[in-house]
Image (cartoon, rainbow, N blue to C red):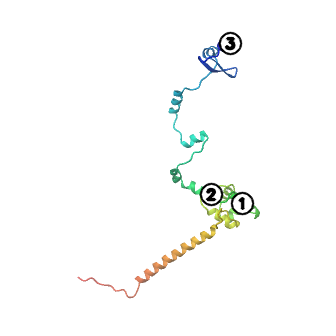
Amino acid sequence: MSEYMVVGEDNFVEALEDGKIVRVREDYARREGLPIIRKPRIYQLHERLSSQPKQSKEVLSRKAGCDYTKPLLDYLKNPDEWKSEQVMSELVDNFHWIIKLERRKRGLTRKQLAKLLGESEDAIKLIENGVLPSKDFVLINKIQQVLGINLRKDGKDFSEEITKKILEERQEKEREENAKEINASELVDDEIEILEEEE
């Protein structure tokens, strides 16, 4: 073996011998039947990559270990995703812990709270785990009203805003109905003259 272990760069390869990687001459490795470890050449890598199906940027970035940022167009195609993020960003940190704590302070089970809110027990379980089942503030508003807590960062009260909005909508409808009644009363009157056409 010593004659083949001469140091130089002529035809040396890495091979497996007795479970270890050793650097020996290629003809020695072939004669001894050692498995040769070869690194692929550049053209081999190119052929292999060109024959593989194209992968999405998301998959490739995940494999590479870096974050893939979605383009704006993807967000516009899936508006629910950014709505959910917007709702979550307006809530206090650890809102789910606050909900769970308040529910327990009042001695309510998830089932009882769900019944009070008119929601499913699964929805309560999700929200107590920090996941919003819907992409809006409807369930959050109900929970705030029943438990008497405020879960928004800015401290705004949802119920006041909603009440104002509902009142404004009702007033607008009443104005429209009154306007229609006035127009109808102008048309119905005893002083209507029927004009005949002259020939």
Quadrant where the image shows the N terminus = top right
Q: How crowded is mark 2: few (under 14 residues within 10 Å), some or many (20 or more)?
A: few
Of 155 and 177, the residue lying toward us:
155
Residue underneath mark 3: 2
Q: Disc 2 versus disc 1: distance between alpha carbons?
A: 16 Å
Residue 180 pos. (x, y %): 45, 78
107 to the left or right of 51: right
Q: Image height check: is 196 above or below 10?
A: below
Asked which secondary structure carries label 2, the reply is helix
Of 120 and 163, the residue lying toward us:
163
Residue underneath mark 2: 89
Q: How crowded is mark 3: few (under 14 residues within 10 Å), some or many (20 or more)?
A: few
Q: Disc 3 versus disc 1: distance between alpha carbons?
A: 75 Å
Residue 1 can be seen, yes or no: no
* Residue 167 found in image quarter: bottom right
168 to the left or right of 196: right
* Residue 144 found in image quarter: bottom right
Give the label, 2 or 3, closer to the camera. Answer: 3
Say which amino acid is labelled 3.
Ser
Q: Image height check: is 161 above or below 40?
A: below
Q: Which of marks 3 and 1 is nearer the N terminus?
A: 3
The tag on residue 98 is: 1
Residue 5 pos. (x, y %): 66, 15
